[in-house]
Image (spheres, rainbow, N blue to C red):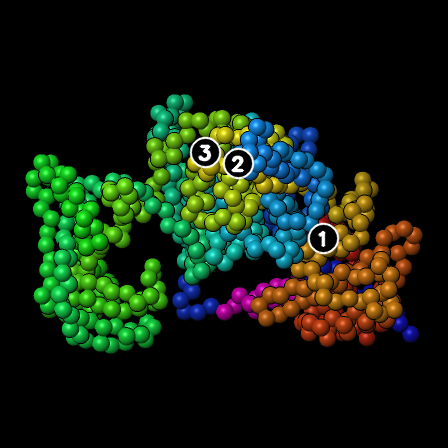
Amino acid sequence: MAKTYKGSLSLEWYNKQKSIMLNNSIGSTSDKDIPAPKINWVNKEDALFYEIVDSEGRGLEPFWVDRSDFRIKEARPLVLQGNYKAMSKDKPGTLPGTDEIFELIESSEDDTELTSFFVRGDNLLAINSLKKMLLNNPNFPKFRCAYFDVPYNTGQAFKHYDDSLEHSEWLTLMRDRIINIYDLIREDGCLIVQVDDIEHHYLKVMLDEIFGRNNFVNQICYERSGSAGIGQSGVFVNTAEYILIYSKNHESFDYNELKKYEALEYETMKRYNKVLQKEGDRELVEEFNSKSNNLPIKIYKHKDYEISSISLRDFENRKSEIYGEFVLKFNKIFRTTNPQAENEFQNDLISKMSGGLYSVEYTPSRGKYKDQLTTIYYNNNEIFAWLKDSAFIENKEIVKSNKMNTIWLHSEIPKADLANEGGVELKRSKKPEQLMKRIFDFATNEGDYILDIFSGSGTSLAVAHKMRRNWVGVEIGKHADTHILPRLKSVISGEDKSGITKSQKWQGGGSFKYYHLGPSIINQSTEGVGDFNWSLGKKFIEESLLLSYDYLLDTTINFQADLLFQSKESQPTIGVQKIGTKTRVAIISLNEPKGKLGIMPYEEIQTIYKTIKSKFAPEYINIFTNRGVEMAYDSKPDDLEVIKVPHAIFAELEK
Ligand SMILES: C[S@@+](CC[C@H](N)C(=O)[O-])C[C@H]1O[C@@H](n2cnc3c(N)ncnc32)[C@H](O)[C@@H]1O
C-alpha cells in the first residue's frame, strides 16, 4: 500500500546536487592555470534585489538577498507595449522605386518573429526573461557584442537615475549581471564595458575573474571632453573614461581591425625609402620542416638583385618628383627592421643567413597569413616591411593606414551636437553616436546581435540599427518610455537625421518591439502566505520556474500517448541541465488551484521517471509539483527527488 511521501521537499537537496555537479566540472586545472587575483568585498557571497517602482520610474533601494533567492533568478513575463515597423513607400511625385520614404506602423501583435527589441525593467531580471526567450529560440545566434555603458558610481543623483551605490553594491550589481549574460555571448564575440576612474580598477580585476585574464583584449582610454572642466573639483581635470574589452574566448575571437588613414608624410617616407628594383636569381640553401605545423620552410639566397634608395635629401625642393617616384614604385618600396630579440623563429632563420638578400617561403601557423604560403624577405639579416602592407593608393596618392591605438581623442570623435543626437537629452550620460559606431565597427558585422542592458537614452540601439545590426536593450528608468522609444521610432521612420545617419546613408526601415518586464511569478499575500501568480497561467509558471533554476526547456518528449497525460492540462513541462558531463532533468507538473489540488499518483511518478531515465540517462531527476505526492518511502529511487512548490521556494525565502 503506497504511503504519502514525506521526504525532503525543499530546494536544499537540489542546491546540493548542483554544487556537486559544478565541483566536478570546474576541478580540472592544468599547470598553466595560474589563478587570477581575486577581489573581495562586503557581502560578495550575496546578491542584490531591485524591485521597480513604476510610479517613480526607477529601482527601489536595492537590498541584499541570497544568491539562490528565487526573486533574482526567476524569469518574469515580458509584456508587449508595442510592435513598430517601418513600411517603405514611394515619395509622392517620384518614379516607383527611385525615392523611398517610410511610414511607421504600430501594432500590439506579439508575433514569434525574432526582431530587435528593448525592455523596461531591472536588467538582472530582464536577462532572466531574455534567456528564456532567446536561448530557446533556434534562430537566435547569440550576441556578437555586449556593450555596457554602466553607471559610473559617481555618487550623484542624476535627473533620470541615481548613480550613488555603495561600493560593494556596485560590484555585486555588475558581477551578477555580467555573469548572467555570459552564456548569451558568442564564442567569437566580446563584452565591452565603459567606466571612469571611480570603479575602473575594481571592475578590471572582477572581469579578469569572470572572463579569464587571457581574454582581456585591450583597454581604450577615451577622452570624454576637451573642455577645461569648469566646476570640477579634484586635483586634475578628469577627462578620461575607460573602455574595457574582453573576448569570450581569445582563440576564436573575431573582430575587424580599425585603421586610421593619413596622407603619406615625410616621416614615413624617410623610413620607407628602399626599393627592391630586381630580385635576381634565387638558389635554395636550406629546407626543413616547421616545429609548429610541420610544413616545409625553404630559405633562398638571391644573386644579381638590385636594391636602390630614394633620396630625400633636398625633399622640400623635389617634393612632387619624389612623391611621384613613390607612387610609381609603390609595390616595391620597403624598410627593414631588426627582428625582436625574443622572436625565436626569426632568429633561427637569420642564423642560417650570411648577409645580402634572402627570401623565405613558409606557411604560418598563426597570425594574419595563417595557413597561406607566404614569402618574407631579409636584407643583411634585417626583415622587410613593405609599404603596401600598411598603405594604399587612392586618386594617385598614397594613403597610409595605421592600426588604431588605444587612446581615442576628443578631436577624433567630436560631439558638439551631442545634446541633439536622437532628439533626446540625457545630460552627462549620453554617448556620441560616433563613439558607438567606432566600437561596433570593430566588434561586429552587419546582421550581428548587440546587447546593451544599460541603454540610457538608447544611443547604442539607435547606432546598431543604423549600422544594420540587430539589437536588444534594457533600461530601468522612465526614460525607456520618454527617450528610447521616441528615439528608435524616429530612427526607423527615417526622421532622425542626427549622429551617424548621414555617414551610414541611413534613410529608415526595419522594426522593433518594446516590452515592459512583467510581474513576479510568485505572490506573497499580506498575511505572508505565498502562492504562484496564477494569473500568468500554468504553462508560463512551469517554464519560468525551470528556467529560474537554469534548465533549458525540452520539447522532444511527448507524454500525451500515455493515458495518464491525455488532457492538455496534465502535460508536464520538461527542463534539462548539463554541467560538465553530468545531466539533470526536471519535470514540473502543476495543478491550477481551481478546486482541490489533488494528489500526484505513484503511477504518474513512475511513468515520468522511467521515460526520463530511458531518454536522457540523467544523474538526477527532480519532479516539481504543487500536488500531494503518493509514494512509498522504500520505492523512491535515490536519484529522484520530488520538490513541493511553491512551499519550497517560500521556505528558502524565509531562511
Ligand atoms: C551611463 S547611462 C547609459 C547612457 C547611454 N549609453 C546613452 O548613451 O544614453 C546608464 C543607464 O543605466 C541605467 N541603469 C542603472 N541600473 C540599471 C538596472 N539595474 N537595470 C537597467 N538599467 C539600469 C540607468 O537608468 C542609466 O540610464
Marks 2/1: CA–CA distance = 49 Å
What number is the disc on residue 544? 1
- Which numbered disc, 1 or 3, marks the residue that appears first in the sequence? 3
Query: How far across and how far down the image is residue 646, in percent?
Result: 78, 53
In this image, 351 relative to 25: left or right? left
Nearer mark to the viewer, of 2 and 1: 2
- Judged by its main secondary structure, the magenta piece is helix
* Crowding near the residue tagged with mark 2, few <14, some 14–19, many ≥20 C-alpha atoms within 10 Å: few
SS class, disc 1: helix
* Residue 375, image quadrant: bottom left
In the rendered structure, which amino acid carries the disc numbered 1?
A: Ser
Quadrant assignment for the N terminus: bottom right
- Magenta residues span 15-28
Does dot 2 land on a helix, a strand or a loop?
Answer: loop
Q: Which residue is mark 3?
A: 502
In this orientation, which residue lies closer to the viewer: 82 or 618?
Answer: 82
Numbered badge on residue 98: 2
In this view, the mark in front (2 or 3): 2
Crowd around label 3: few <14 · some 14–19 · many ≥20 (10 Å): few
